[in-house]
Amino acid sequence: MTPSHGIISLSKSKTFWIALISILALLSVRIFDFLTTETLVRFLTKGGYVYLLVLSALFLYTLWRFLKIHGRVANLKQRVSFHRFQIAALFVLAFLAHQHEPHIFRVFYDEAEFLGQARIMHLERLAGVPGQYHTFDGNAFPVAVNPALRPPLFSFVLSLVHDAVGYRPENVFFLNAFFSLICLFLSYSLSFMLTGSRLLALLPPIGLFAFPLFAQVSSSGGYDLFNLTLLLQLLLSGVFYFRKQDEETWRWFLFSSLLLVHCRNESVLYVLVPVLAWMIVSAKTNTWKLSGFTAASPLFLSYPILWNLYFSKNPGFQYEHMREDGQAFFSIAYLPEHLQDALVYLLTPSLDSTNSLIIAICVLTGLAFILFCFPIRLVRGISQESEVLVLLGTVVALAGFLTIQSVFWGGLTDVLASRFFLPLLLMGLIGFLLLLHEIPNDRKRFLAPAALLLFVGAGLLESLPSQARHHATRSMPGAQHYEVLVEFLSHQSIDKSRSLFTGTGSTFFFAHGFNAVPFDALQRRPERIDQMIGHDLYENIFISVLEIDGHTASMGGTIAADLRALFVLEEVFQHRHHRNMQSTLYRIVGRLDNEGNPVVLQPGSLALPSFTDMDAKTAYLLHALGIQQ
């Protein structure tokens, strides 16, 4: 049989093609080792925006082709009418999820980085975070734009929102509110496709809402809900692929995984889901084939490969300041303690946490059902296609979770780390749904409504009170620090072009439209203050400080314990969150020389040389600030 246009048949030379693809994949990883750090930075930052634009466009193209070929839009009105009560319920759930938890920035480093990267994408079309950002003579100067510690897809999507409606840091809350609704809709759609029951299909979205963690991430500035939405979209496309087994559906399935790869670090594992699904379908039908479109798709793994290589060449990004001497960044030795933390988090009833004991028990039951029953059915050859897909998704989600739990930090009892459980929460809810679906119809008539009422009860008795208390959110140092800073700055008439921020959260200040410089840059060269104030570049230079248990925290290390040994400071405001934590904002009015004598300069006290053009003046100022050597 002659293969269709654009399809390469592998049936006659299957071993050759698989071997060739494997060798090329291995070579593609090793050959990048020869690239210098400068080359990696140039590709990742200057090419990252266009790269993500092309990837997103191809994903939308494959989705549009699927919808067009299979007529999924033609009868949309009838489908909406058929599910109208369930759709109304989903809107109510999405609305309630945003009523109690405050819409604030929570995770100390991640969310500031997302905001900063989205702003530089919006302004400069660069994929990264600037080490410094200065403004003078009406011109902006991002300095040392390097790849961010987190994959750039979420920041890219957020930058598109900024492009459409104008730049505001709070746009991220509207974006996550949108994804919370889409996430609930996709969970219902996937569940209905797996069971065909409108009643049972409500269990996963209600289960997500009834787990307070969902409301917390929905009202945050992070990417965890976006990652969950993409995972649901991957599973939904996988269901269609197993049923249709055509090229258009396969392309959508494949590019759904490639999009997910660029969201979270461990999400790169999800590319295995379509690959393994393709192998299962090909082996079952004995029609191994590969289109040119599919053969070129691994090119979109180049960015995460280069991104990983960049950070592996820079061990300074592995949080040495947070680790004890000799403590490894990654080790399976951390697993026993972290898995114990996970069970404590899930099975401890408390309104001060983001867990739900009722939902957690159902989720663990669902995970056990998938991981123990589905492999047996697969080996016996009696498994359904939907079960194969759910098994693949669960195994990969579990592998990703175990990978995170093998890092020195990340136990779920830490309020900053509990969000790592979201993918397994979703898969466990789907497993519990499929378990109920297998119950005989005469019993399901009673058990399905009972399970629905149980989930609703968990939402009313556990989730809503927990959201209203939002104790876990109030326990996050970054959430408290950011909140008081945003509140203070919103009531101040500060000229952003004439103000510079440093200290705890310099990236956060850049994201809010201010000029920013890392504190260690000033710590290494305090005399830069002379240039900034003396040349009248800035009216105000602020240092933000967050102190926890007497120690000063920062994004990239530890700020000098005694700032007054370096600078002449004026306290602008101070807020004590509780007995052991406070936020302080200082204004630098001068510095101390090597003998400890104050060097207090007035704006404009240093005369500028005469310049023939603005470019020469800019070059002089950049050199004086140490930005250009």
Image: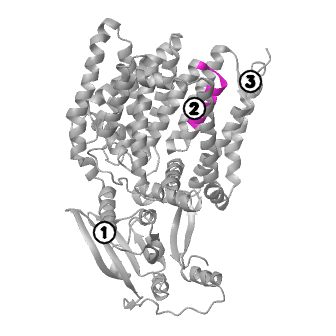
Where residue 38 sits, quadrant-wise, is bottom right
Q: Which mark is residue 345?
A: none
Q: Quadrant of the C terminus?
A: bottom right
Give the mark, 2 or 3, whose residue is nearer the N terminus: 3
Q: Position of residue 212 (x, y in %)?
A: 29, 39
Mark 3 → mark 1, Cα distance in angstroms: 68 Å
Q: Earlier in the sequence, mark 1 or mark 2?
A: 2
Main structural element of the magenta stretch: helix, strand or loop?
helix
Tell me if mark 2 has few (under 14), some (14-19) or many (20+) residues whose alpha carbon lies within 10 angstroms of its own: some
Q: Mark 3 or mark 1: which comes first in sequence?
A: 3
According to the picture, the residue beneath numbered tag 2 turns out to be 272
Nearer the observer: mark 1 or 2; the answer is 1
Tell me the CA gap for discs 1 and 2: 50 Å
Q: Residue at x 35, y 53 (%)?
A: 106
The range drawn in magenta is 244-257
> What amino acid does circle 3 point to?
Thr
Across and down, in percent, residue 447 comes to: 28, 14
Measured in 3D between alpha carbons, the distance from the residue under mark 2 to the one under mark 3, in whole angstroms, is 19 Å
